[in-house]
Amino acid sequence: MKILSALFISFFLLIGSSFQNASAYTINYTHSDLQYTDSGVQIYGISGKDFLAKGFAGQVDYIKNFTNGMDIPFVRGQTGDIFGSDKNDYFHGFYDYYNNRLLGGKGDDFYEAQPTYAMFEKPGEGTDIYLAYGNTGPAQENIENIISKGASRVYGNASDNLIFAEGKGSEIHGGGGNDVMLVNGLHDNFSGEDGIDTIIFPGSVHDYVFTGDPWIVTVKNIKTGGMYQIFDHGVEQYQFDDAFFGPEAGINTLQVGPDKPFKKIMDALRVAGDGDTIEVDSGVYEDDVAIITRSVTIRGVGGRAHFYAKSPSFTGKANFITMNANITFDNIEFSGNKTADRNGAGIRMEGSIPGGIITVKNCYFHNNEVGILAGNQTNGVLNIENTEFGYNGVSYGVASTVNVGVIKALNITNSYFHDTMNGHNVVSYADTLNITNSYFYDGTANTSFNISMNRGLNSTITGNTFVQTDSGENTHMILNTATQSSIISENTFINNASLGVSAIQNNSPLGITLDNNKLYNYKVFIEGNTTFTGTGNTILDAVTVNLPTPNTSVGNISFPNPQTIVTQITKDNTEFTTMTTIDSYTGRNITVGVGKDYSTLKAAIENALSGDRIYIDEGVYASDYAIIANKNIAIIGLGKGAELKKVQEIPNGKAILVSNTSNIYLENIIFSDSNVPDLNGAGIRYEGGTMSIMNCTFRNNENGILGGVTPVGKGKIWIYNSRFLDNGRNGTGFTHAIYIGEMDYVEIKNSVVRGTSVGHHIKSRARMSIIENNLLDDGLQDASYNIDLPNGGDGIIRGNTIIQSALSPNRTMVSYCAEKNPPNPGTLIVENNIFESFGNTAIGVKNFRNNQVILRNNTFKNVSTKFTGVNVTEENSASTVQNIPITADSLPQFSQTPSPAITPAVQVTPAQIEQIPVQVTIPPVINLP
């Protein structure tokens, strides 16, 4: 049954009087248009929307013109059948008693006639309407919608009918089928008869109901919304297959769907009352928009009900506009909302002060300009639970996913925001803002801030995960400009973007409370007003964080925790037994920083003696260059690290730090931006001795570490837990992240080398090279070899993840014995590594000479050739080649953390220096696969 909406019914009720007042003119038909029969005249409607009328004898071909521009023939004749066309026909004005037959035929036909006329429709001939001004008489079959104006008896038929009686005291008989019966007055009588019938009471009182069974029941207290009673002659009864709806009828359920009493949500909302639930079958409802003034629950059943704004909505604003009501949306999908002002929303909260409470749960908003938009409402509250927002926004301009004005509270929990275009995920002017256990991800869109707090009294952001990518257009995840109490705690901030600077930009004059937050790949937590209270916040340079995809199944969103295996490197680890530790330095403690022993590292080194420890306050030390010669010292950065940054030209023409001593220990130092005229500048220039590097960062230098040749027995380097980011900056191909000249031994473990330009990540001529448990990642740069051991010698390459970009000019990932001939004797063991290429024709390992190469238990992804060269064996037959499709989305993220311009903040007195533990705590890092 196709049930007409109340708006459609009203239209037909209103136009009835206008038919009588239309201006007229005459058109002559030829006799071929008429067929005379024994019983009278048969008149066939012309194509289009025909309006055939009969009322007076002896006249034919009388045409009236209506203001809407349709020419509709009025046909006057005597008794006989009148036929409609295959189009939509209007039969109007049949008020005589000739007992004619009206045959509408195909199309959606409209009959306005006395019940003495017989109206005929066949099954499948459209959705038809019968309008009477009194009793209808038994309705003819296949006429679906019956309307009576005035008090009357109205009869349905075996079809699913919509029956409307305008007059008070009417009697409605549903007949067969699942009928919807509407009442417009008091004391109306209904007989549902067969089928599951729906009776709709718009605020009426004491209506009498005939149900499908013979008893008479009385529905009381409908208007008050109380516990109404249904009686059969004083005995309480209830007919279970009938439903009672109405604005004052208490808690009722209305059903929307292709085979339900209401076909569109807008129809159900016209008759819904406060407290009602509207159940919407799963499926797509195009351009079904509504303004909601009642406090109702709208729930998708059997799956999500999808409201798709295919064309601009009649509201010009949103799928649904809420007006000062308490409304719950549950299991609903909103999409396609676009308006002329580029502010089309799935839901728009409007209305005068004070406003209502809107609850959105288990919903999905996608491909709208705005997800939810709320105006100013003093007591308005928006609750969002277990809901996904994806791919909202505009191609230009600014439109944010959730944007609320001055309301009482915005509460978001367990929800997922991703791929917002040209706007923020959440913009809040609410008095109270609470965001908990939610997941914010830039994805591939140019998202601005994840959260923008512009006004309020208090905000709490707890237990969320924020992931920034290179697509994001802002350098911060949270912006606070509100003069309010702000608590940000237990969150995880992950920077996978080269432009990420800080997690929070605080432009408020008030400080923020920060507790137990974790930051990955951020050097600075907060910028602007950096005043904050709280403890337990950590910054981790964990460049590889496994982020499981959120579960976004219907009715459930869950966010697995980021999978990070964190380890701490200490001197007790047996792997470090041969490495020089801080225990070896038992001399004086020297401090560097504002108000300390020395203001520069250079001065401290010049005045240090062998065995001394130099502690440098956290901060940036511009143009602080030094040479260490014949002094065995330890240099330790405090706090977040001491950054030695090249600004002015380096006088020695070599490096920020030049080391030529028997024993040097470096910890928590950052070397950045080193370059010299001969294009071979370095963060550290190693010229001999033993060097231990722990938890240091080398960023944006021509070379990270440049190691020279040392005599046999005189040269060893250990590099642990360190980061080499964006080095090789001159682009000549002769500068590398790590270059080790011919020496005895180099060991590189638990470190990250990423984004080297043109040169190699690691180039070692050492007689023994151990490269273990590192991430070697081209990122978006064009590094050459990931590992180059050009002189041969012994080597162990174990447990690394080696990633080659499509931009790499050299398709070999590990090169062995490429330059020295004959090479240094030795064997290369390559085991338990992951090789992954994002280009074509990649080679995993290439042996240029006759030294032995052994491969064990490696995994190759998109690598065309596992190995080439002679004397290469593969043991255990465990190596695998896995060809994977390469797409833009699968390219590795490139991470770069620009240096913050901060002043030293850690203040340590000479007395406190003596209490610093011998083993300085080392920040945890990711244990790479």
Image (spheres, rainbow, N blue to C red):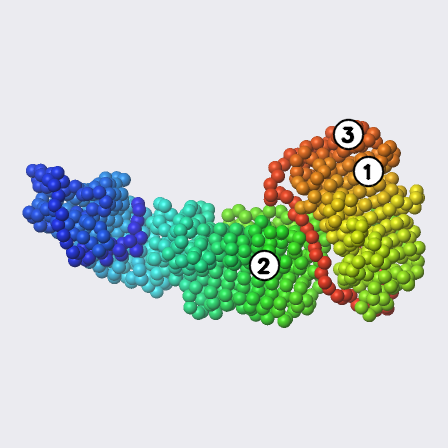
Q: Position of residue 400 (x, y in %)?
A: 52, 58
Q: Amino acid at mark 1?
A: Pro
- Identify which residue is drawn at 71% across, 51% down: 542
Relative to 880, residue 663 above or below: below
Q: Name the residue tied to disc 1.
A: 790
| Residue 606 location (% of width, % of height) | 90, 61
Q: Which residue is mark 2?
A: 449
Asked where in the image residue 44 lies, by quadrant, the reply is top left
Instruction: Tell me how far mark 3 sits from mark 2, CA to CA.
Output: 52 Å
Which callout, 1 or 2, points to the residue nearer the camera? 1
In the image, residue 497 lies at what x, y percent? 65, 52
Mark 3 nearby-residue class (10 Å; few <14, some 14–19, many ≥20):
some
Q: Amino acid at mark 2?
A: Phe
Mark 1 lies on a secondary structure that is: loop
Quarter in which the N terminus is drawn: top left
Q: Which residue is mark 3?
A: 869
